[in-house]
Amino acid sequence: MTPTVDELDVKLVELLAAEPRIGVLEASRRLKVARGTVQARLDRLVARGVIKGFGPELDPAALGYGVTAFITLEIRQSGGHDPVAAHLSTIPEVLEAYTITGGGDLLCRIVARSNADLQRVIDEIVSYDGILRASTLIALAEQLPYRTLPLVGKAARHG
């Protein structure tokens, strides 16, 4: 199996991660390759979905949402996941939602301004008729932030 990324891709992604506002011309200078090469690599990584976006990375705590929690939802099976996901998408404090295996049906990462506000967010989530039960865990401290950069190098080495 051929690797999805090679060493030049790794260096480009690492450079973009370290300096998200760097231009293609400066990236080509730093990587010692032609500007067209950097642009072609970047276009290919975007087209293949390896790079999903270039937007700013936001910190919910800096926006006043200092409480992070994870909520497992059990849903009414007859209604399916899509209507519940549509409901969750209307709640700004729901950052992510995944269909899961195990004791629940959906796992969400949510944020709130305080523990009291967390109760408001949970109440808003479970107000939907398709949700039968919810179980919440409050995160005390982030030990390892969401990261994907280590995967880039491993993908290049192992294909």
Image: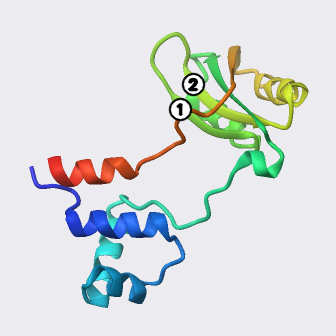
Q: Residue furthest right?
A: 116
Earlier sequence position, callout 1 versus callout 2: 1
Q: Is residue 145 above or below residue 102?
A: below
Amino acid found under the numbered disc labelled 2: Leu
Report x, y in % for residue 62.
77, 51
Report x, y in % for residue 57.
61, 58
Q: Secondary structure at mark 2?
A: strand
What's the colour scheme?
A: rainbow
Q: Which residue is mark 1?
A: 98
Asked whether residue 159 is in view, the answer is no
Disc number for residue 106: 2
Q: Is residue 136 above or below residue 10?
A: above
Residue in the picture at 68% in, 14% down: 135
Q: Is residue 100 left or right of residue 70?
A: left
Q: CA distance from mark 1 to mark 2?
A: 5 Å
Amino acid found under the numbered disc labelled 1: Tyr
> Quadrant location of residue 34?
bottom left
